Amino acid sequence: YHGAKTSGTFHLTDPYFDEGGSDINMVSLTMPVFVEGKFIGVAGADLALDRVEKMVGKIRLRLHLEEEGGTTDADEKQFAYLVSKTGKLIAHPDHSLLVRRGNAGANVDVLPDAHEIKAHAEGYAAVVIDGQKRRIYWATAPLTGWKLVLYVPEAVVSGPVVHMTLSTLLIGVGGLALTIFLVTAIARQLARPIVQLRSASASLERGDFQDSHVGDLAKRPDELGDLAH
């Protein structure tokens, strides 16, 4: 009530545990109500955060190389979390950092990437967490000021490049092998009449030459045919 009244506009609270009421984590969304310019009260609604946490928990970077359906190892290594406008953690895979009974919840400052995320409304950064290279992407919702942050392993981001490199390499090796095969086959095809003529010449030198030694070579309309004739 107080936030919407004093700001005169849409107000969104930080996450809190509704102890003694619904006993769940929630946020309150309120709007001041004016009649002929006079403030008469506040209209609002409470939003339970359990559904929000599930939605954030399913966010992943999807690549066209991944198979449809099921979860991959890369899925398990990705995770997202949500931060309020004041820096309070709204949703995070580590539930010990969230609001709960007897605990006000943690601020984004406890996370290793807090400085970059707080400094910019959106962007990305490369970090090393627990010895693993990761990419962090984040963006800010214009109405609420909440920031959605996505952690992605470096291997997931570079995966398509590696896949394309391997595919290109395999295509190149296959093309080279095919070229060698074709060149060899053509060379043998071209050399066959010469080999046949050499064999015929050898038989002529020995004195046991027969027409069958040149076969159909004499019918060729080129220099080899002339030589065979």
Image (tube, helix red, strand yellow):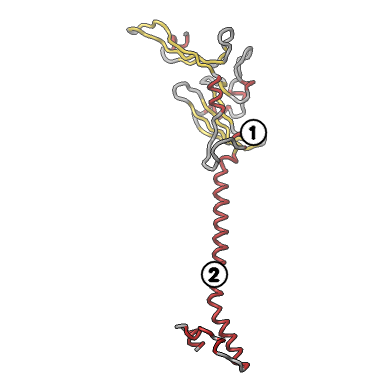
Where is residue 62? Give x, y as percent: 53, 37
Q: Secondary structure at mark 2?
A: helix
Left or right, 228 with respect to 208, comes to: left
How packed mark 2 is, by other alpha carbons closer than 10 Å (few <14, some 14-19, many 20 or more), is few
Say which residue appears at 56% left-offset and 14% top-offset.
Answer: 16
Where is residue 46? Give x, y as percent: 49, 13
Q: Residue furthest bottom?
A: 207
Q: Residue furthest left?
A: 36
Rendered image quadrant of residue 110: top right
Residue labelled with disc 1: 129
Viewer-closest of 127 and 170: 170
**Labels 2 and 1 touching (C-beta < 8 A):** no
Q: Amino acid at mark 2?
A: Val
Rendered image quadrant of residue 67: top right
60 vs 174: above or below:
above
149 vs 160: above or below:
above
Q: Secondary structure at mark 1?
A: strand
How packed mark 1 is, by other alpha carbons closer than 10 Å (few <14, some 14-19, many 20 or more), is few
Say which residue appears at 54% left-offset and 30% top-offset.
Answer: 59
Q: Residue furthest right?
A: 131
Q: Between tags 2 and 1, which lies in front?
A: 2
Could you tell me how far apart the alpha carbons at marks 2 and 1 are, in whole angstroms?
Answer: 53 Å
Disc number placed over residue 183 in the picture, else none: 2
Which mark sits nearer the N-terminus, 2 or 1? 1
Where is residue 140? Give x, y as percent: 48, 26
Left or right, 226 with respect to 152, comes to: left
